[in-house]
Image (spheres, grey):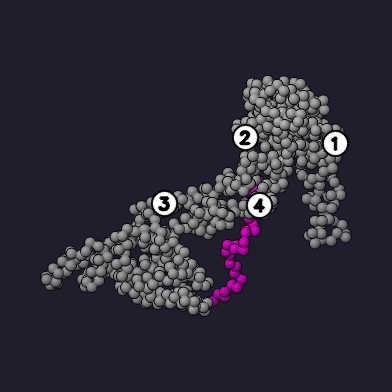
C-alpha cells in the first residue's frame, strides 16, 4: 500500500525573525551598579560602560574574556600545524609507488634483464625533489598496478587540493572523481572565469549570473544571490590561499608550483585556477593578498585545510579587532556573531549578543543621556536605579549588624504623607481608592474593554497611601571633598553614602528637605548628579566653617522641620571664610579657623540641630577635635569602616527622625526603625 504524503507535517528551525521573543530581558541592575561605581570614581559614563563591557560580571563573560579565547585559539592554530601537509602526502605516495614498482621488478622473471636494469636505474636516479620526481615519472610505464595507482593518487590529490583551496569541501567531494567529473569542473572554471571577466568589463547582467548558477550552483554551497556575493565569498578564500603560499618557505612554494602542473594529469586545471586568482584579485584588491603567518607545529595541513586555517586566522584577527572596541564609534553591534559562533562556539556568541543587548538597553532605555556638549551622562532614571541598589546594601548591613527588621510600612498608624505606591504583599497601609479605580479604568480601556458596566480590579491596580510617624526633618549632609579624601580611597564611599541617603529621602521620606554640601578649600551646595560626577579636588583645604554656614542657612529656610546635621570628614578644618568672602588657608589649622568653625557649629546647636560626626581615619588630633566639637552640641561621633559609612549615615538619619534612644547603637541610635526598597 502506498502511503499518502502528510501535507500537514510541521517543520521546525531556528527563529530568524529578529531578537528572540521568548528570551529573558537583560538585567541592567549589575551593569548600572558597576557603571555607577566607575562614574563616582571619576570615569565618564561612556568609559564606565566600555569598562563594564570589557570586564563583564560574575554571571556574564566580558569582551576581555572573549578576546583572550580568540587569541588562545589563534596561538593554538599556529603552534599545532605546519604547511607541509600536501608535500608530505606526495612524498609518501611517491615512496609507495617507487617501492611497489621495485618489488614488481624483482618478482617479474619474464622481464628482459636490460629493461629491468634500465627501469631500476630510472628509479634509483630520481631527483630528490618530489615535484621533479613526479614530473619525470609522468611518462614512466609502470609494471606494478599498485605503483600505478599510488602515482595516479598523487595527481588526483593535487587536483583536489588545488580545488579545495578555492572551493571549500572539494577535496572530499571529488575523492572518487571520474573523468566526467573532472571535465565538469574544467567547464565550470571556464564559465566562471568568463563571467568574472565579463563583469570586469561591465557587460554582465543578473540573467548571466542566474544562468551560471542554474548550471553550476552545486559547486557553491554559500548560495550567493548575485555576482558581488559570489566575488566576496570566493575572493576571501582565494586571498587566504595566497597567504598560505606566502607563509611557505621558497622551497615549499616552488615544489607546489611544479606539482600543480601534474594536477589531474594535465596543466589545464592549474591554468584555469591561475586565471581565476587573477580575476578575483582584480575584482577585490582590498583583500589581504600579501599577508602570511608563522606556523610552528608538527601537524601538517593540506592545501585546502591550510587555506581554511588561514581563513580562520583572518576571522580571528577580525574578531580580535571587533572585540577590542578601540576604534572611533565602536559598538557591540560591530561584532560578527556568526563568525564568533563559528570560531568559539554558540555560547560565546550568546555572551556577545547579551553584551550588545546590554549596551543597546543602556542607551535606548534612558539610562545614558547626552548633555549639551554631546557627552554621555547618567540620567536621573539611572541615578534612581543606582541609588536603590546602594540603599539595598545599606538595608542589609543595618539589618545584619543590628538585628533590625525590614518593614513594608512607614508608620501605618501615622500621618498620611500624600504619596502612594503599588501594593505589595504584607502592606498594611490604607488603599488609595481614587488611584486604584483610575488604574483599573485606564487598564481596561487600554485593553479594549468597556467600562460602562463597571470595571474589574486587578491586583496590579491597587495603590496604598504612604504614612509617616514623625514630623518633617531638614537634613544637611556635609561631605569632605578635600585632597586627603581622594588620596586615601574615601572618595567613592563618600559618594555612595550621599546617593544612598538621597535615594532614601526621595523615595521614602519625601516630606524631608535634604541639602548636600561638599567642602574642600571652600564649600558648595550640590545636586546629587553633580556630587556623584565630581572629580577629585587636588587643592588642599578643609573649609568646615563655610559648610556649616550653608547648612545653617538651609535650616533657617525650614523653621518648622527638625534640623539634622550629618558631617563626614577625615581632617581638621584648615580653611575658613574671611568677612570679605575670601578663603583663608593654613596648616596646621590656624586658631581663627577653629574659632570660626566652632562658632558656626554653636549656631547649628542653637537651631536645635541633631548633630553626628562621621570620622574617617585614626589620626589622634582629628579624634580629639571631633570629640570636643560633638560634646559642645550634645552630638555623636561615629568612626565607621569605609564599607559601613553608608549604613552609619543612613542609620543616624533614621534615628534622628524615629522614636527611641538616640544613643542606643553604634550608628547613632536609629531606634529599631526599618525601611524597604522596591526592586
Q: CA distance from mark 1 to mark 2?
A: 47 Å
Q: Are marks 2 and 3 in contact (CB under 8 Å)?
A: no
The residue indicated by pointer 2 is 538
Q: Is residue 408 above or below residue 189?
A: above
Q: Quick one: label 1, few (<14), some, or many (20+) residues within 10 Å?
A: few
Res. 345 visible in picture = no
Q: Are marks 4 and 2 in contact (CB under 8 Å)?
A: no
The foreground one among 538 and 49 is 538
Q: CA distance from mark 1 to mark 3?
A: 70 Å
Tell which circle, 1 or 4, labels the residue nearer the N-terminal end: 4
Residue range (magenta): 1-29
Between disc 1 and disc 4, the foreground one is 4
The foreground one among 219 and 488 is 488
Q: Quick one: label 3, few (<14), some, or many (20+) residues within 10 Å?
A: some
- Indicate left or right for 376 with 504 as reference: left
Image location (x, y in percent) of residue 548:
75, 30
Tell which circle, 3 or 4, labels the residue nearer the N-terminal end: 3
Q: Secondary structure at mark 2?
A: loop
Image location (x, y in percent) of residue 292:
39, 58
- Indicate left or right for 290 with 425 as reference: left
Q: Secondary structure at mark 4?
A: loop
The residue indicated by pointer 4 is 374
Quadrant hosting residue 464: top right
Quadrant hosting residue 571: top right
Image location (x, y in percent) of residue 649:
71, 32
The foreground one among 529 and 397 is 529
Q: CA distance from mark 2 to mark 3?
A: 48 Å
Amino acid at each position: 500500500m502506498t502511503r499518502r504524503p502528510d501535507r500537514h507535517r510541521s517543520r521546525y528551525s531556528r527563529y530568524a525573525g529578529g531578537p528572540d521573543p521568548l528570551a529573558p530581558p537583560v538585567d541592567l541592575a549589575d551593569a548600572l551598579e558597576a557603571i555607577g561605581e566607575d562614574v563616582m570614581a571619576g570615569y565618564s559614563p561612556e568609559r564606565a560602560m566600555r569598562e563594564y563591557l570589557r570586564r563583564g560580571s560574575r554571571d556574564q563573560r566580558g569582551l576581555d574574556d572573549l578576546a583572550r579565547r580568540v587569541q588562545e585559539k589563534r596561538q593554538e592554530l599556529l603552534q599545532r600545524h605546519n604547511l607541509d601537509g600536501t608535500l608530505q602526502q606526495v612524498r609518501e605516495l611517491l615512496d609507495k609507488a617507487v617501492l611497489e614498482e621495485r618489488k614488481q621488478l624483482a618478482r617479474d622473471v619474464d622481464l628482459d634483464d636490460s629493461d629491468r636494469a634500465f627501469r631500476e636505474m630510472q628509479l634509483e636516479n630520481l631527483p630528490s625533489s618530489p615535484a621533479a620526481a613526479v614530473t619525470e615519472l609522468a611518462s614512466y610505464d609502470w609494471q606494478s598496478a599498485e605503483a600505478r595507482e599510488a602515482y595516479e593518487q598523487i595527481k588526483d590529490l593535487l587536483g583536489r587540493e588545488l580545488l579545495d583551496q578555492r572551493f571549500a569541501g572539494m577535496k572530499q567531494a571529488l575523492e572518487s572523481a571520474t573523468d566526467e567529473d573532472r571535465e565538469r569542473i574544467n567547464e565550470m572554471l571556464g564559465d566562471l572565469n568568463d563571467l568574472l571577466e565579463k563583469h570586469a568589463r561591465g557587460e554582465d547582467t543578473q540573467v548571466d549570473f542566474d544562468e551560471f548558477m542554474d548550471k553550476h550552483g552545486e559547486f557553491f554551497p554559500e548560495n550567493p544571490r548575485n555576482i558581488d556575493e559570489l566575488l566576496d565569498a570566493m575572493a576571501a578564500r582565494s586571498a587566504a590561499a595566497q597567504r598560505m603560499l606566502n607563509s611557505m618557505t621558497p622551497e615549499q612554494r616552488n615544489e607546489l608550483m611544479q606539482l600543480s602542473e601534474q594536477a589531474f594529469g594535465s596543466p589545464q586545471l592549474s591554468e584555469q585556477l591561475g586565471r581565476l586568482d587573477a580575476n578575483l584579485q582584480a575584482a577585490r584588491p582590498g583583500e589581504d593578498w600579501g599577508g602570511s603567518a608563522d606556523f610552528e607545529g608538527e601537524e601538517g595541513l593540506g592545501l585546502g585545510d591550510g587555506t581554511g586555517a588561514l581563513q580562520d586566522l583572518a576571522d580571528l584577527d577580525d574578531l580580535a579587532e571587533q572585540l577590542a572596541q578601540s576604534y572611533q564609534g565602536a559598538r557591540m553591534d560591530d561584532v560578527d556573531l556568526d563568525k564568533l559562533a563559528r570560531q568559539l562556539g554558540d555560547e560565546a556568541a550568546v555572551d556577545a549578543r547579551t553584551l550588545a543587548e546590554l549596551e543597546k538597553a543602556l542607551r535606548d532605555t534612558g539610562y545614558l543621556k547626552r548633555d549639551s556638549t554631546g557627552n554621555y551622562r547618567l540620567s536621573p532614571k539611572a541615578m534612581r536605579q543606582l541609588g536603590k541598589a546602594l540603599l539595598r546594601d545599606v538595608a542589609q548591613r543595618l539589618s545584619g549588624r543590628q538585628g533590625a527588621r525590614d518593614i513594608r510600612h512607614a508608620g501605618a498608624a501615622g500621618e498620611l504623607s500624600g504619596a502612594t505606591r503599588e501594593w505589595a504583599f504584607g502592606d498594611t497601609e490604607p488603599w488609595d481608592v481614587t488611584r486604584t479605580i483610575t488604574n483599573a479604568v485606564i487598564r481596561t480601556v487600554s485593553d479594549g474593554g468597556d467600562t460602562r458596566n463597571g470595571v474589574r480590579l486587578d491586583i496590579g491596580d491597587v495603590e496604598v497611601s504612604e504614612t509617616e510617624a514623625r514630623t518633617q526633618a531638614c537634613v544637611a549632609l556635609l561631605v569632605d571633598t578635600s585632597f586627603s579624601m581622594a588620596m586615601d580611597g574615601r572618595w567613592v564611599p563618600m559618594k555612595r553614602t550621599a546617593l544612598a541617603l538621597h535615594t532614601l529621602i526621595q523615595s521614602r521620606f519625601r516630606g524631608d528637605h535634604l541639602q548636600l554640601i561638599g567642602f574642600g578649600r571652600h564649600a558648595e551646595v550640590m545636586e546629587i548628579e553633580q556630587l556623584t560626577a565630581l572629580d577629585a579636588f587636588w587643592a588642599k583645604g578643609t573649609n568646615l566653617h563655610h559648610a556649616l554656614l550653608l547648612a545653617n542657612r538651609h535650616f533657617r529656610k525650614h523653621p518648622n522641620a527638625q534640623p539634622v546635621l550629618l558631617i563626614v570628614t577625615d581632617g581638621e578644618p584648615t580653611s575658613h571664610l574671611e568677612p570679605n568672602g575670601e578663603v583663608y588657608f593654613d596648616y596646621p589649622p590656624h586658631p581663627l579657623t577653629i574659632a570660626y568653625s566652632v562658632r558656626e557649629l554653636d549656631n547649628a546647636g542653637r537651631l536645635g540641630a541633631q548633630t553626628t560626626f562621621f570620622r574617617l581615619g585614626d589620626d589622634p588630633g582629628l579624634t580629639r577635635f571631633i570629640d570636643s566639637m560633638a560634646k559642645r552640641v550634645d552630638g555623636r561621633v561615629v568612626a565607621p569602616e569605609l564599607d559601613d559609612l553608608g549604613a552609619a549615615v543612613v542609620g543616624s538619619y533614621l534615628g534622628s527622625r524615629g522614636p527611641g534612644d538616640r544613643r542606643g547603637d553604634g550608628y547613632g541610635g536609629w531606634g529599631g526603625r526599618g525601611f524597604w526598597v522596591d526592586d
